[in-house]
Image (spheres, rainbow, N blue to C red):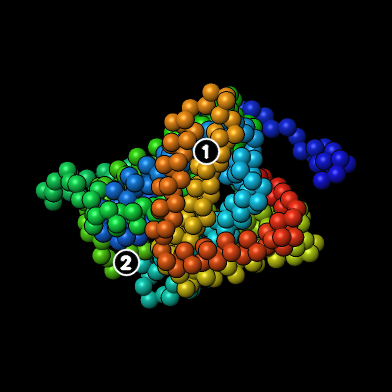
Amino acid sequence: MTVAEESQHHEHHGTLQKQLGLRSLILFGLAYMCPIIVLGIFGVIAGLSQGGSSGSYLLATVAMFFTAMSYGLMAKHFPVAGSAYTYVRSALDSRLGFVVGWTILLDYLFLPLVIWLIGAAYLKGEYPNVPIAVWVVTFIVITSVLNVLGLKVADRTNFVLMTVQLLILILFVVLSITHLLHGSQSLVSTVPFTGGGFGPLTAGAAVAAYSFLGFDAISTLTEEAHDARRNVPRAIVLVALIGGAIFVVVTYFVTLVAPGGTFSNTDSLAADIAKTIGGSLFGAVFLTGLIVGQFTSGLAAQAAVARLLYAMGRDRVLPERVFGWVSERFHTPVLNIALCGVIGLGAIFLDVTTSTSFINFGAFTAFTLVNIAVIAYFLRNRGQGLSGMRYLLLPGVGALIDGYLLTQLDSKALVLGLSWLGIGVVYLLVLTRGLTKEPPVMAAIVEAE
Protein backbone atom coordinates (compact mmCIF):
# COMPACT_ATOMS: atom_id res chain seq x y z
CA MET A 1 0.00 0.00 0.00
CA THR A 2 1.46 3.38 -1.00
CA VAL A 3 1.59 6.37 1.31
CA ALA A 4 -1.23 8.02 -0.63
CA GLU A 5 -3.37 4.90 -0.49
CA GLU A 6 -2.68 4.46 3.22
CA SER A 7 -3.64 8.07 3.86
CA GLN A 8 -6.84 7.64 1.89
CA HIS A 9 -7.53 4.40 3.78
CA HIS A 10 -7.33 6.19 7.12
CA GLU A 11 -9.49 9.05 5.89
CA HIS A 12 -12.39 6.67 5.34
CA HIS A 13 -11.99 4.67 8.54
CA GLY A 14 -12.51 6.23 11.95
CA THR A 15 -10.70 5.21 15.11
CA LEU A 16 -12.21 2.35 17.07
CA GLN A 17 -13.54 3.46 20.46
CA LYS A 18 -12.73 1.65 23.69
CA GLN A 19 -16.17 0.89 25.08
CA LEU A 20 -16.23 -2.81 26.02
CA GLY A 21 -15.67 -4.11 29.54
CA LEU A 22 -15.01 -7.67 30.68
CA ARG A 23 -18.70 -8.58 30.87
CA SER A 24 -19.35 -7.35 27.32
CA LEU A 25 -16.36 -9.28 26.00
CA ILE A 26 -17.57 -12.48 27.67
CA LEU A 27 -21.08 -11.97 26.32
CA PHE A 28 -19.75 -11.45 22.81
CA GLY A 29 -17.66 -14.60 23.00
CA LEU A 30 -20.57 -16.72 24.24
CA ALA A 31 -22.94 -15.32 21.62
CA TYR A 32 -20.41 -16.01 18.87
CA MET A 33 -19.89 -19.53 20.24
CA CYS A 34 -23.66 -20.21 20.07
CA PRO A 35 -23.99 -22.65 23.04
CA ILE A 36 -27.17 -24.30 21.69
CA ILE A 37 -25.04 -25.99 19.03
CA VAL A 38 -24.22 -28.59 21.72
CA LEU A 39 -27.70 -30.00 21.13
CA GLY A 40 -27.42 -29.64 17.37
CA ILE A 41 -24.50 -32.08 17.19
CA PHE A 42 -25.21 -34.14 20.33
CA GLY A 43 -26.03 -37.30 18.36
CA VAL A 44 -22.75 -37.08 16.44
CA ILE A 45 -20.67 -36.75 19.62
CA ALA A 46 -22.65 -39.52 21.34
CA GLY A 47 -22.00 -41.85 18.42
CA LEU A 48 -18.28 -41.14 18.16
CA SER A 49 -17.69 -41.36 21.94
CA GLN A 50 -19.96 -44.43 22.30
CA GLY A 51 -22.13 -42.71 24.87
CA GLY A 52 -19.43 -40.57 26.50
CA SER A 53 -20.38 -37.11 25.26
CA SER A 54 -19.59 -35.42 28.59
CA GLY A 55 -16.14 -37.01 28.63
CA SER A 56 -15.49 -35.85 25.08
CA TYR A 57 -16.54 -32.30 25.94
CA LEU A 58 -14.39 -32.39 29.08
CA LEU A 59 -11.35 -33.37 27.00
CA ALA A 60 -12.19 -30.67 24.45
CA THR A 61 -12.51 -28.11 27.28
CA VAL A 62 -9.02 -29.01 28.54
CA ALA A 63 -7.61 -28.61 25.03
CA MET A 64 -9.39 -25.29 24.55
CA PHE A 65 -8.18 -24.06 27.96
CA PHE A 66 -4.53 -24.41 26.98
CA THR A 67 -5.20 -22.81 23.61
CA ALA A 68 -7.24 -20.01 25.18
CA MET A 69 -4.31 -19.25 27.46
CA SER A 70 -2.08 -18.91 24.40
CA TYR A 71 -4.59 -16.65 22.63
CA GLY A 72 -4.74 -14.53 25.77
CA LEU A 73 -0.98 -14.14 25.92
CA MET A 74 -0.73 -13.17 22.25
CA ALA A 75 -3.61 -10.70 22.64
CA LYS A 76 -1.62 -9.13 25.47
CA HIS A 77 1.54 -8.71 23.40
CA PHE A 78 -0.16 -7.85 20.09
CA PRO A 79 -3.15 -5.69 21.15
CA VAL A 80 -4.49 -5.11 17.65
CA ALA A 81 -7.48 -6.43 15.73
CA GLY A 82 -6.85 -9.82 14.24
CA SER A 83 -6.30 -13.25 15.66
CA ALA A 84 -4.42 -16.42 14.67
CA TYR A 85 -3.20 -14.96 11.36
CA THR A 86 -1.78 -11.85 13.04
CA TYR A 87 -0.15 -13.77 15.90
CA VAL A 88 1.55 -16.40 13.74
CA ARG A 89 2.67 -13.83 11.18
CA SER A 90 4.12 -11.58 13.89
CA ALA A 91 5.74 -14.17 16.17
CA LEU A 92 6.72 -16.91 13.74
CA ASP A 93 6.92 -16.18 10.03
CA SER A 94 4.95 -14.37 7.34
CA ARG A 95 4.75 -17.52 5.23
CA LEU A 96 3.37 -19.58 8.12
CA GLY A 97 1.02 -16.68 8.74
CA PHE A 98 -0.23 -17.02 5.18
CA VAL A 99 -0.82 -20.74 5.74
CA VAL A 100 -2.87 -19.94 8.87
CA GLY A 101 -4.83 -17.34 6.93
CA TRP A 102 -5.49 -19.94 4.24
CA THR A 103 -6.81 -22.45 6.82
CA ILE A 104 -9.00 -19.73 8.34
CA LEU A 105 -10.41 -19.13 4.86
CA LEU A 106 -11.31 -22.84 4.86
CA ASP A 107 -13.45 -22.29 7.97
CA TYR A 108 -15.18 -19.28 6.44
CA LEU A 109 -15.85 -21.02 3.12
CA PHE A 110 -17.29 -24.22 4.56
CA LEU A 111 -19.03 -22.92 7.69
CA PRO A 112 -22.24 -22.10 5.73
CA LEU A 113 -22.21 -25.70 4.38
CA VAL A 114 -22.08 -27.11 7.93
CA ILE A 115 -24.81 -24.75 9.14
CA TRP A 116 -27.12 -25.66 6.26
CA LEU A 117 -26.40 -29.37 6.71
CA ILE A 118 -27.23 -29.40 10.43
CA GLY A 119 -30.51 -27.58 9.75
CA ALA A 120 -31.34 -29.91 6.86
CA ALA A 121 -30.53 -32.98 8.99
CA TYR A 122 -33.07 -31.93 11.63
CA LEU A 123 -35.74 -31.22 9.01
CA LYS A 124 -34.99 -34.60 7.43
CA GLY A 125 -35.54 -36.20 10.84
CA GLU A 126 -38.91 -34.47 11.14
CA TYR A 127 -39.96 -35.16 7.55
CA PRO A 128 -38.20 -38.44 6.63
CA ASN A 129 -39.91 -38.75 3.26
CA VAL A 130 -38.38 -35.52 1.98
CA PRO A 131 -34.82 -36.02 0.62
CA ILE A 132 -32.20 -34.06 2.54
CA ALA A 133 -31.07 -32.53 -0.79
CA VAL A 134 -34.38 -30.64 -0.93
CA TRP A 135 -33.73 -28.95 2.41
CA VAL A 136 -30.09 -28.18 1.57
CA VAL A 137 -31.00 -26.60 -1.78
CA THR A 138 -33.86 -24.67 -0.15
CA PHE A 139 -31.52 -23.18 2.44
CA ILE A 140 -28.96 -22.28 -0.23
CA VAL A 141 -31.44 -20.71 -2.68
CA ILE A 142 -33.25 -18.59 -0.09
CA THR A 143 -30.12 -17.32 1.65
CA SER A 144 -28.31 -16.70 -1.65
CA VAL A 145 -31.19 -14.70 -3.09
CA LEU A 146 -31.49 -12.61 0.07
CA ASN A 147 -27.75 -11.93 0.15
CA VAL A 148 -27.67 -11.02 -3.57
CA LEU A 149 -30.54 -8.57 -3.05
CA GLY A 150 -28.46 -6.98 -0.34
CA LEU A 151 -30.70 -7.74 2.61
CA LYS A 152 -29.09 -6.15 5.65
CA VAL A 153 -29.40 -8.39 8.68
CA ALA A 154 -29.42 -6.48 11.96
CA ASP A 155 -26.34 -6.79 14.14
CA ARG A 156 -26.33 -9.66 16.57
CA THR A 157 -28.41 -8.68 19.59
CA ASN A 158 -26.32 -10.56 22.09
CA PHE A 159 -28.58 -10.27 25.11
CA VAL A 160 -31.66 -11.55 23.26
CA LEU A 161 -29.84 -14.40 21.54
CA MET A 162 -28.08 -15.55 24.67
CA THR A 163 -31.26 -15.34 26.74
CA VAL A 164 -33.24 -17.48 24.28
CA GLN A 165 -30.44 -20.02 23.90
CA LEU A 166 -29.80 -20.33 27.62
CA LEU A 167 -33.53 -20.66 28.34
CA ILE A 168 -33.82 -23.53 25.86
CA LEU A 169 -30.72 -25.21 27.29
CA ILE A 170 -31.92 -24.77 30.89
CA LEU A 171 -35.39 -26.06 29.99
CA PHE A 172 -33.81 -29.02 28.18
CA VAL A 173 -31.81 -29.92 31.31
CA VAL A 174 -34.75 -29.40 33.70
CA LEU A 175 -37.05 -31.55 31.54
CA SER A 176 -34.32 -34.20 31.29
CA ILE A 177 -33.98 -34.31 35.08
CA THR A 178 -37.76 -34.46 35.50
CA HIS A 179 -37.98 -37.29 32.98
CA LEU A 180 -35.26 -39.24 34.80
CA LEU A 181 -36.89 -38.76 38.21
CA HIS A 182 -40.28 -39.88 36.90
CA GLY A 183 -38.61 -43.01 35.61
CA SER A 184 -36.89 -43.55 38.98
CA GLN A 185 -33.50 -43.31 37.28
CA SER A 186 -30.39 -42.20 39.15
CA LEU A 187 -28.99 -38.77 38.43
CA VAL A 188 -25.47 -39.89 39.30
CA SER A 189 -23.42 -41.86 36.78
CA THR A 190 -19.90 -42.03 35.39
CA VAL A 191 -21.01 -43.47 32.03
CA PRO A 192 -21.42 -40.05 30.31
CA PHE A 193 -17.72 -39.45 31.07
CA THR A 194 -16.31 -42.89 30.24
CA GLY A 195 -18.26 -43.95 27.15
CA GLY A 196 -16.36 -46.47 25.06
CA GLY A 197 -12.94 -45.62 26.50
CA PHE A 198 -10.16 -43.16 25.71
CA GLY A 199 -10.06 -43.76 21.95
CA PRO A 200 -13.75 -43.06 21.29
CA LEU A 201 -13.68 -40.15 23.76
CA THR A 202 -10.84 -38.44 21.85
CA ALA A 203 -12.64 -39.05 18.54
CA GLY A 204 -15.68 -37.33 20.04
CA ALA A 205 -13.54 -34.52 21.45
CA ALA A 206 -12.05 -33.84 18.01
CA VAL A 207 -15.55 -33.02 16.72
CA ALA A 208 -16.80 -31.51 19.99
CA ALA A 209 -14.25 -28.72 19.52
CA TYR A 210 -16.59 -27.39 16.81
CA SER A 211 -18.87 -26.19 19.61
CA PHE A 212 -16.07 -23.99 20.98
CA LEU A 213 -15.37 -22.10 17.76
CA GLY A 214 -15.79 -18.44 18.59
CA PHE A 215 -13.93 -18.06 21.90
CA ASP A 216 -10.90 -16.83 19.95
CA ALA A 217 -13.04 -14.17 18.22
CA ILE A 218 -12.80 -12.04 21.37
CA SER A 219 -9.27 -11.10 20.33
CA THR A 220 -10.75 -9.21 17.39
CA LEU A 221 -12.22 -6.67 19.84
CA THR A 222 -8.86 -5.80 21.38
CA GLU A 223 -8.86 -2.23 20.03
CA GLU A 224 -12.36 -1.61 21.43
CA ALA A 225 -11.83 -3.02 24.93
CA HIS A 226 -11.06 -1.17 28.13
CA ASP A 227 -7.74 -2.33 29.64
CA ALA A 228 -7.38 -4.75 26.73
CA ARG A 229 -4.10 -6.26 27.94
CA ARG A 230 -5.91 -7.48 31.06
CA ASN A 231 -9.55 -7.96 30.05
CA VAL A 232 -9.17 -9.64 26.64
CA PRO A 233 -6.99 -12.54 27.91
CA ARG A 234 -9.32 -13.03 30.89
CA ALA A 235 -12.41 -13.01 28.68
CA ILE A 236 -10.92 -15.53 26.22
CA VAL A 237 -10.13 -18.04 28.98
CA LEU A 238 -13.41 -17.48 30.83
CA VAL A 239 -15.52 -17.98 27.70
CA ALA A 240 -13.72 -21.24 26.93
CA LEU A 241 -14.31 -22.46 30.50
CA ILE A 242 -17.93 -21.23 30.72
CA GLY A 243 -18.75 -22.75 27.34
CA GLY A 244 -17.09 -26.01 28.37
CA ALA A 245 -19.07 -26.11 31.63
CA ILE A 246 -22.35 -25.58 29.74
CA PHE A 247 -21.51 -28.31 27.23
CA VAL A 248 -20.48 -30.84 29.89
CA VAL A 249 -23.55 -30.26 32.07
CA VAL A 250 -26.05 -30.33 29.19
CA THR A 251 -24.58 -33.47 27.60
CA TYR A 252 -24.40 -35.22 31.00
CA PHE A 253 -28.14 -35.10 31.62
CA VAL A 254 -29.10 -35.62 27.98
CA THR A 255 -26.85 -38.70 27.88
CA LEU A 256 -28.67 -40.13 30.90
CA VAL A 257 -31.93 -39.76 28.97
CA ALA A 258 -30.48 -41.29 25.79
CA PRO A 259 -27.53 -43.52 26.79
CA GLY A 260 -25.35 -45.44 24.39
CA GLY A 261 -23.80 -44.52 21.08
CA THR A 262 -25.90 -46.26 18.46
CA PHE A 263 -28.90 -44.37 17.13
CA SER A 264 -30.94 -44.51 13.94
CA ASN A 265 -31.04 -40.71 13.68
CA THR A 266 -27.62 -39.57 14.87
CA ASP A 267 -27.62 -36.26 12.98
CA SER A 268 -30.96 -35.12 14.50
CA LEU A 269 -31.06 -37.01 17.79
CA ALA A 270 -31.75 -34.01 20.03
CA ALA A 271 -35.10 -33.34 18.33
CA ASP A 272 -36.36 -36.80 19.26
CA ILE A 273 -35.04 -36.42 22.81
CA ALA A 274 -36.90 -33.10 23.07
CA LYS A 275 -40.17 -34.90 22.26
CA THR A 276 -39.36 -37.64 24.77
CA ILE A 277 -38.78 -35.27 27.66
CA GLY A 278 -41.24 -32.51 26.81
CA GLY A 279 -43.81 -33.92 24.45
CA SER A 280 -44.68 -32.75 20.94
CA LEU A 281 -45.04 -29.10 21.98
CA PHE A 282 -41.53 -28.77 23.36
CA GLY A 283 -40.24 -30.82 20.44
CA ALA A 284 -41.79 -28.33 18.03
CA VAL A 285 -40.46 -25.35 19.99
CA PHE A 286 -36.97 -26.82 20.06
CA LEU A 287 -36.96 -27.69 16.36
CA THR A 288 -38.31 -24.27 15.36
CA GLY A 289 -35.74 -22.46 17.47
CA LEU A 290 -32.90 -24.57 16.10
CA ILE A 291 -33.95 -24.18 12.44
CA VAL A 292 -34.50 -20.42 12.73
CA GLY A 293 -31.11 -20.13 14.42
CA GLN A 294 -29.46 -22.18 11.67
CA PHE A 295 -31.12 -20.13 8.92
CA THR A 296 -30.11 -16.75 10.31
CA SER A 297 -26.64 -18.07 11.11
CA GLY A 298 -26.27 -19.39 7.55
CA LEU A 299 -27.43 -16.07 6.13
CA ALA A 300 -24.83 -14.19 8.13
CA ALA A 301 -22.08 -16.75 7.42
CA GLN A 302 -22.65 -16.59 3.65
CA ALA A 303 -22.69 -12.80 3.70
CA ALA A 304 -19.47 -12.79 5.71
CA VAL A 305 -17.56 -15.16 3.43
CA ALA A 306 -18.74 -13.28 0.32
CA ARG A 307 -17.41 -10.06 1.87
CA LEU A 308 -14.15 -11.78 2.82
CA LEU A 309 -13.59 -13.10 -0.70
CA TYR A 310 -14.39 -9.67 -2.14
CA ALA A 311 -11.88 -7.99 0.18
CA MET A 312 -9.22 -10.56 -0.71
CA GLY A 313 -9.94 -9.95 -4.39
CA ARG A 314 -9.70 -6.21 -3.84
CA ASP A 315 -6.36 -6.72 -2.05
CA ARG A 316 -5.26 -8.94 -4.98
CA VAL A 317 -4.57 -11.92 -2.74
CA LEU A 318 -7.16 -13.66 -4.98
CA PRO A 319 -7.82 -12.81 -8.67
CA GLU A 320 -9.39 -9.35 -8.62
CA ARG A 321 -11.52 -9.71 -11.78
CA VAL A 322 -13.51 -12.55 -10.24
CA PHE A 323 -13.49 -12.09 -6.49
CA GLY A 324 -13.26 -8.30 -6.48
CA TRP A 325 -16.28 -7.84 -8.78
CA VAL A 326 -19.49 -6.26 -7.47
CA SER A 327 -22.80 -6.26 -9.34
CA GLU A 328 -23.74 -2.78 -10.59
CA ARG A 329 -27.42 -3.63 -10.17
CA PHE A 330 -27.44 -5.18 -6.70
CA HIS A 331 -24.21 -3.70 -5.33
CA THR A 332 -23.30 -7.09 -3.88
CA PRO A 333 -20.51 -9.60 -4.72
CA VAL A 334 -22.85 -11.92 -6.63
CA LEU A 335 -20.14 -14.29 -7.90
CA ASN A 336 -18.79 -14.81 -4.39
CA ILE A 337 -22.28 -15.46 -3.03
CA ALA A 338 -22.89 -17.96 -5.84
CA LEU A 339 -19.55 -19.68 -5.16
CA CYS A 340 -20.49 -20.09 -1.51
CA GLY A 341 -23.81 -21.61 -2.61
CA VAL A 342 -22.10 -24.04 -4.97
CA ILE A 343 -19.75 -25.15 -2.18
CA GLY A 344 -22.79 -25.56 0.06
CA LEU A 345 -24.18 -28.17 -2.35
CA GLY A 346 -21.48 -30.44 -1.00
CA ALA A 347 -23.71 -30.87 2.06
CA ILE A 348 -25.83 -33.26 -0.04
CA PHE A 349 -22.92 -35.71 -0.15
CA LEU A 350 -21.54 -35.22 3.38
CA ASP A 351 -22.72 -36.07 6.87
CA VAL A 352 -22.51 -33.85 9.95
CA THR A 353 -19.50 -35.74 11.35
CA THR A 354 -17.36 -35.25 8.24
CA SER A 355 -18.39 -31.65 7.68
CA THR A 356 -17.77 -30.52 11.27
CA SER A 357 -14.46 -32.38 11.24
CA PHE A 358 -13.54 -30.54 8.05
CA ILE A 359 -14.15 -27.22 9.77
CA ASN A 360 -12.13 -28.38 12.77
CA PHE A 361 -9.16 -29.20 10.52
CA GLY A 362 -8.69 -25.50 9.91
CA ALA A 363 -9.37 -24.64 13.55
CA PHE A 364 -6.91 -27.16 15.00
CA THR A 365 -4.24 -26.12 12.49
CA ALA A 366 -4.62 -22.49 13.56
CA PHE A 367 -4.81 -23.40 17.27
CA THR A 368 -1.64 -25.51 17.07
CA LEU A 369 0.32 -22.74 15.36
CA VAL A 370 -0.87 -20.11 17.84
CA ASN A 371 0.49 -22.26 20.67
CA ILE A 372 3.78 -22.60 18.80
CA ALA A 373 3.78 -18.83 18.22
CA VAL A 374 3.73 -18.29 22.00
CA ILE A 375 6.76 -20.54 22.36
CA ALA A 376 8.54 -18.65 19.58
CA TYR A 377 7.76 -15.33 21.29
CA PHE A 378 9.25 -16.70 24.53
CA LEU A 379 12.44 -17.86 22.82
CA ARG A 380 12.88 -14.45 21.18
CA ASN A 381 12.30 -12.54 24.43
CA ARG A 382 13.86 -14.78 27.08
CA GLY A 383 15.64 -11.91 28.77
CA GLN A 384 12.43 -10.05 29.61
CA GLY A 385 11.39 -12.11 32.63
CA LEU A 386 8.72 -14.20 30.90
CA SER A 387 7.42 -17.25 32.76
CA GLY A 388 8.61 -20.55 31.32
CA MET A 389 5.47 -22.21 32.65
CA ARG A 390 3.08 -19.85 30.86
CA TYR A 391 5.10 -19.26 27.69
CA LEU A 392 6.74 -22.65 27.17
CA LEU A 393 5.15 -25.53 29.08
CA LEU A 394 1.43 -24.66 28.80
CA PRO A 395 1.46 -23.73 25.08
CA GLY A 396 3.64 -26.79 24.44
CA VAL A 397 0.99 -29.01 26.03
CA GLY A 398 -1.69 -27.11 24.11
CA ALA A 399 0.08 -27.65 20.79
CA LEU A 400 0.48 -31.37 21.49
CA ILE A 401 -3.19 -31.78 22.44
CA ASP A 402 -4.44 -29.78 19.43
CA GLY A 403 -2.10 -31.68 17.13
CA TYR A 404 -3.28 -35.02 18.52
CA LEU A 405 -6.95 -34.11 18.21
CA LEU A 406 -6.24 -33.03 14.63
CA THR A 407 -5.15 -36.60 13.85
CA GLN A 408 -8.38 -37.96 15.39
CA LEU A 409 -10.63 -36.22 12.89
CA ASP A 410 -12.72 -38.13 10.38
CA SER A 411 -10.47 -39.67 7.69
CA LYS A 412 -12.43 -38.03 4.88
CA ALA A 413 -12.07 -34.67 6.60
CA LEU A 414 -8.32 -35.19 6.93
CA VAL A 415 -8.01 -35.92 3.21
CA LEU A 416 -10.09 -32.85 2.31
CA GLY A 417 -8.24 -30.66 4.82
CA LEU A 418 -4.78 -31.76 3.69
CA SER A 419 -5.83 -31.24 0.07
CA TRP A 420 -6.93 -27.70 0.91
CA LEU A 421 -3.66 -27.10 2.75
CA GLY A 422 -1.71 -28.43 -0.23
CA ILE A 423 -3.51 -26.03 -2.56
CA GLY A 424 -2.63 -23.20 -0.20
CA VAL A 425 1.06 -24.14 -0.15
CA VAL A 426 1.19 -24.30 -3.96
CA TYR A 427 -0.61 -20.95 -4.18
CA LEU A 428 1.89 -19.49 -1.70
CA LEU A 429 4.80 -20.71 -3.83
CA VAL A 430 3.25 -19.02 -6.87
CA LEU A 431 2.59 -15.73 -5.05
CA THR A 432 6.09 -15.60 -3.56
CA ARG A 433 7.84 -16.92 -6.69
CA GLY A 434 9.19 -19.93 -4.84
CA LEU A 435 9.42 -18.17 -1.44
CA THR A 436 11.80 -15.56 -2.84
CA LYS A 437 9.61 -12.68 -1.72
CA GLU A 438 7.17 -11.86 1.05
CA PRO A 439 3.59 -13.13 0.66
CA PRO A 440 0.84 -10.51 0.32
CA VAL A 441 -0.72 -9.29 3.55
CA MET A 442 -4.17 -10.77 4.10
CA ALA A 443 -5.70 -7.54 5.37
CA ALA A 444 -9.13 -8.99 4.73
CA ILE A 445 -8.50 -11.86 7.14
CA VAL A 446 -7.55 -9.42 9.88
CA GLU A 447 -10.70 -7.39 9.26
CA ALA A 448 -12.94 -10.47 9.14
CA GLU A 449 -11.52 -11.99 12.29
Residue 205 pos. (x, y %): 36, 52
**Foreground residue among 175 and 76:** 76
> Helix, strand, or loop for circle 2?
loop
Work out whether residue 183 can be spotted: yes
Q: In this view, does 288 lie above or below 186?
A: below
* Residue at 61% over, 43% down: 92
Residue 245 is left or right of residue 24, and the answer is: left
* Residue at 28% over, 69% down: 264
**Which labelled disc corresponds to residue 265?**
2
Residue 53 pos. (x, y %): 30, 52
**Foreground residue among 245 and 93:** 93
**Foreground residue among 374 and 245:** 374
- Give the residue number, with chain letter if any, for mark 1: 375
How far apart, in angstroms, are the residues tagged by discs 2 and 1? Answer: 44 Å
Residue 10 is left or right of residue 31, and the answer is: right
- Most extreme residue toward the right, as rendered? 4
Name the image quarter holding the C terminus: top right
* Residue at 67% over, 45% down: 447
* Residue at 64% over, 46% down: 93
Numbered disc total? 2
Which comes sooner in the sequence, label 2 or label 1? 2
Q: Which amino acid does label 1 sit on?
A: Ile
Q: Which amino acid does label 2 sit on?
A: Asn
**Foreground residue among 417 and 273:** 417
